[in-house]
Amino acid sequence: MKKYNFGYLFLMITVIFFSTYEVVSKTIIGRVNPFQINFLRFFIGGSLLFLFLLIKHDLKIDKKNLAIVALAGILNVVFSMNLLQLSLSIAYAKAAIVAVIFSSNPIFVAIFAAIMDKERIPLFKAVGMLLGVLGIAAISIDGQALGDINILSPLLALMSAVLYGLYTVVGRRASSKIGSLKMNAYSFLIGSLALLPFLLIKDIPVFKFDYSACLQVVYLSVFVTGIAYLTYFMGLTRTGAGSGSMVFFLKPVLASLFAIVFLSERVTLNLVLGTALILLGMAVMLYWEGIWKKFV
């Protein structure tokens, strides 16, 4: 039980950092290219983690795990995160909708974990997932007329969530064998270097940007990428990919709260209702089994 408690603690740290991503990113629009920030955050975050490996004299990795780590890095950095950025760049795209659709990735984590790692999805977890999806839907459609939503943006965000789900299962598999620190260090560097040719072909600056955004770039690189991904896989190795990723349902709730506090966005009925459904879904997934055993 203590192992699982620490696992969920690590995952909560991850979700808190991840939930600040949209708010911080919104402050650097026009100052840093979206694809450039992806390269910078994973290259800087990966370099920081790689430095820790150097200090520990723990750089060794076999070819099989290197291949798995490389696949994880490309899935995450090159495809999932760039699709997420593209979804935000579409005309009339709604950042809130993109954020909550991406937060549905635990569903795909559970599906891929069931297929690849034979993780079972019991009924109570399926019910909890459904409640979480309903909560996300309530927040995402808040105040949006159907005619205002560009279908391409949500579609790209959904593709990003699917690939992130696959990345999570692949990355968890490598992390359980070589450790979260090594998995993230190598996958971030490989993924960012695989993204580099795209920047050069598109003539996007690699390191040149408006340096007034330096603090945000450092925060996104060190905390949202380096530390948050590290605690993410430390948590998953203790809880399992399917169960652990469920805390992602909290991201739209926390992201909305951060937006209210730091961007002065308003509190709505849909936000309150969605938050209640998400919290109820998480409670069912995390505590139903223990409660059921006490009364049966």
Image (cartoon, rainbow, N blue to C red):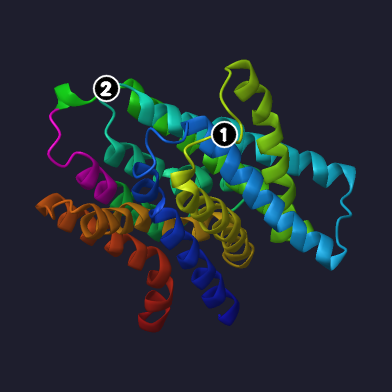
Q: Is residue 166 left or right of residue 104?
A: right
Q: Quadrant of residue 101?
A: top left
Q: Is residue 286 magenta?
A: no
Where residue 66 sits, quadrant-wise, is top right
Does 190 sit above or below residue 130? above
Answer left or right for 106 relative to 113. left
Residue 183 image point, x, y percent: 72, 52
Label for residue 150? 2
In the rendered structure, the answer to whether residue 267 lies left or right of residue 154 reads: left
Among the two numbered marks 1 and 2 on one chain, the one whose residue lies closer to the N terminus: 2
Q: Quadrant of the C terminus?
A: bottom left
Mark linked to residue 264: none
Q: Is 231 or 296 nearer to us in this picture? A: 231
Picture residue at 34% right of the left edge, 37% below the top = 98
**What's the magenta region?**
134-145
Please name the residue that numbered disc 1 is placed on. Answer: 208
Amino acid found under the numbered disc labelled 2? Asn
Local crowd size for mark 2, using a 10 Å CA cut-off: few (<14), some (14–19), many (≥20): some
Question: How many numbered marks does the figure carry?
Answer: 2
Disc 1 residue crowd, few under 14, some 14–19, many 20+, Cα 10 Å: few
Compared to 129, does 283 lie above or below? below
Q: Nearer the viewer, residue 116 or 170?
A: 170
Q: CA distance from mark 1 to mark 2?
A: 32 Å
Query: What is the x, y in percent for residue 209?
Result: 51, 35
